[in-house]
Image (cartoon, rainbow, N blue to C red):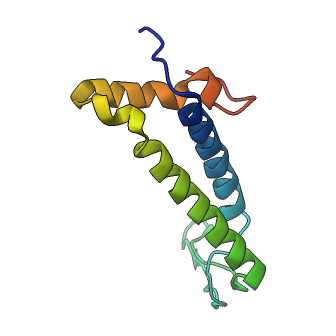
Amino acid sequence: MADTPFPSDLLTAQLALHQARAEYAAFCRTLPWSVEPTPGWPGEVHPHTGVVTGGREDSPGYTDEQKAEYERLSRLVRDLSIQVSTHPHWENLTGEALVTARMVLKHHPDAVPAGVAAA
């Protein structure tokens, strides 16, 4: 497939979106399992193997700083998603051509963060 030319501001926005999503996902992995302090519960012991499954430890809840950072990152991802999806470049494309062009943009070498292989 021929490389679709994209405006530089669209490539920049897509790159920023990839980076923001990665930062958001990494941050979410560090958070407690519950926003509010919540007691955990014990797992169940399998009667034959003794293996414990399920259960959770107590959650301390999010700190005010974690709540603020979560909100900042989710807002950034949302705003960049809107910027990419409503860019004027898409106005002259419809149907399969639009879908194909959007997929090409997601994997464009200039829109993929360094260290990530473009497909």
Q: Nearer the viewer, residue 97 or 45?
A: 97
Image quadrant for the N terminus?
A: top left
Q: Nearer the viewer, residue 83 or 104?
A: 83
The single residue placed furthest to the top in the displayed view is 2
x 53%, y 35%: residue: 10
Q: Is residue 63 something one can see in this rendering?
A: no
Please, is residue 29 above or below residue 37 in the view? above
x 57%, y 32%: residue: 11
Image quadrant for the C terminus?
A: top right
The single residue placed furthest to the front in the displayed view is 88
In the image, residue 3 lies at what x, y percent? 48, 12
The single residue placed furthest to the left in the displayed view is 95
Please, is residue 45 above or below residue 25 in the view? below
Please, is residue 98 above or below residue 46 in the view? above
In the image, residue 115 lies at what x, y percent? 75, 29
Q: Quadrant of residue 43?
A: bottom right
Q: Is residue 87 something one can see in this rendering?
A: yes
